[in-house]
Image (cartoon, rainbow, N blue to C red):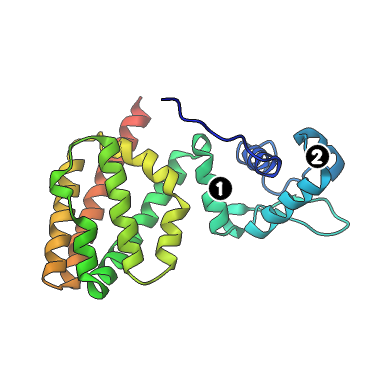
């Protein structure tokens, strides 16, 4: 059955199009946006709607708004917050391999931390989060969703609310890249090893073992990703 998608509200549409224009370079970093009247006409929205959008983008770090001056596009990768990360991921077609690699590096760095804390704080919850991995059918979509759910749950069980916020920031690209990752040789076996080993660490209430396994898996996962990127470059 066809998946119905609700049309964007004017503010959502305007924000999406403005961010898209920034990402593709129509409005590069340190450039000035057109005046309010011209920009509202270009986007086909009212000026109050545009002001709402600009204020939100200013809070996230996309633009710098100063009364009496032109609105400047900030260096959003340096000055932005988690809202910028979430918005970039919504524009998946504009996410460069380099940026994707940076997202993966972030995940490799934080996964051992939240996994270790989850096993230390809630070993039973960790076991429950991993329940069912042995029955998974091999398939990129199935494993991508399961892996996301496992890592998100581990981040919540860490009791550090920043970890799930960070993961939520790139959920869309996580699924997109997950399907690519699980089409690669060795990905299923590596994830199964992770699920099995973390389950055992939780059963033994051994956070140190969980940290060791997670670091090992993240390192090997990074090698798989480098192979994927190298193959893409060769093509």
Q: Which residue is mark 1?
A: 87
In the rendered structure, the answer to whether residue 64 lies left or right of residue 61 reads right
Task: State the residue at coordinates (34%, 57%).
Answer: 152
* C-beta proximity under 8 Å, tags 2 and 1: no
Task: State the residue at coordinates (67%, 53%).
Answer: 57
For residue 84, above or below residue 25:
below
Q: Circle 2 sits in a helix, a strand or a loop, which is it?
A: helix
The reply to whether residue 227 is visible in this rendering is: no
For residue 31, which quarter of the picture? top right
Measured Cα–Cα span from mark 2 to mark 1: 21 Å
Q: Position of residue 24 (x, y in %)?
A: 61, 36
Q: Position of residue 61 (x, y in %)?
A: 64, 57
Q: Say how many tags the image has.
A: 2
Task: State the residue at coordinates (14%, 52%).
Answer: 193
Q: Which residue is mark 2?
A: 40
In the rendered structure, the answer to whether residue 24 lies left or right of residue 199 reads right
Q: Circle 1 sits in a helix, a strand or a loop, which is it?
A: helix
Q: Nearer the viewer, residue 25 or 45?
A: 45
Figure quadrant of the N terminus: top left
Q: Residues within 10 Å of mark 2 (few under 14, many from 20)?
A: some
Q: Nearer the viewer, residue 52 or 217?
A: 52
For residue 116, which quarter of the picture? bottom left
Q: Position of residue 76 (x, y in %)?
A: 61, 53
The reply to whether residue 165 is visible in this rendering is: yes
């Amino acid at each position: 059955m066809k998946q119905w998608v609700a049309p964007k509200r004017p503010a959502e549409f305007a924000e999406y199009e403005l961010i898209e224009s920034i990402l593709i370079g129509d409005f590069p970093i340190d450039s000035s946006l057109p005046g309010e009247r011209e920009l509202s006409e270009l986007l086909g929205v009212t000026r109050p709607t545009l002001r709402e959008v600009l204020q939100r983008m200013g809070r996230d770090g996309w633009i710098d708004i100063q009364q009496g001056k032109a609105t400047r596009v900030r260096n959003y990768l340096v000055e932005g917050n988690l809202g910028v990360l979430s918005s970039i991921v919504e524009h998946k077609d504009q996410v460069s391999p380099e940026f994707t690699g940076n997202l993966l590096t972030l995940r490799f760095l934080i996964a051992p931390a939240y996994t270790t804390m989850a096993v230390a704080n809630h070993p039973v919850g960790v076991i429950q989060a991993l329940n069912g991995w042995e029955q998974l059918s091999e398939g990129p979509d199935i494993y991508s969703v399961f892996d996301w759910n496992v890592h998100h749950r581990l981040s919540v069980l860490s009791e550090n609310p920043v970890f799930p916020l960070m993961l939520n920031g790139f959920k869309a690209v996580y699924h997109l890249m997950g399907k690519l990752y699980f089409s690669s040789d060795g990905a299923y076996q590596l994830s199964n090893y992770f699920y099995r080993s973390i389950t055992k660490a939780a059963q033994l209430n051994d956070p140190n073992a969980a940290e060791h396994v997670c670091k090992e898996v993240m390192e090997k996962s990074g090698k798989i990703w480098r192979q994927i990127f190298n193959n893409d470059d060769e093509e």
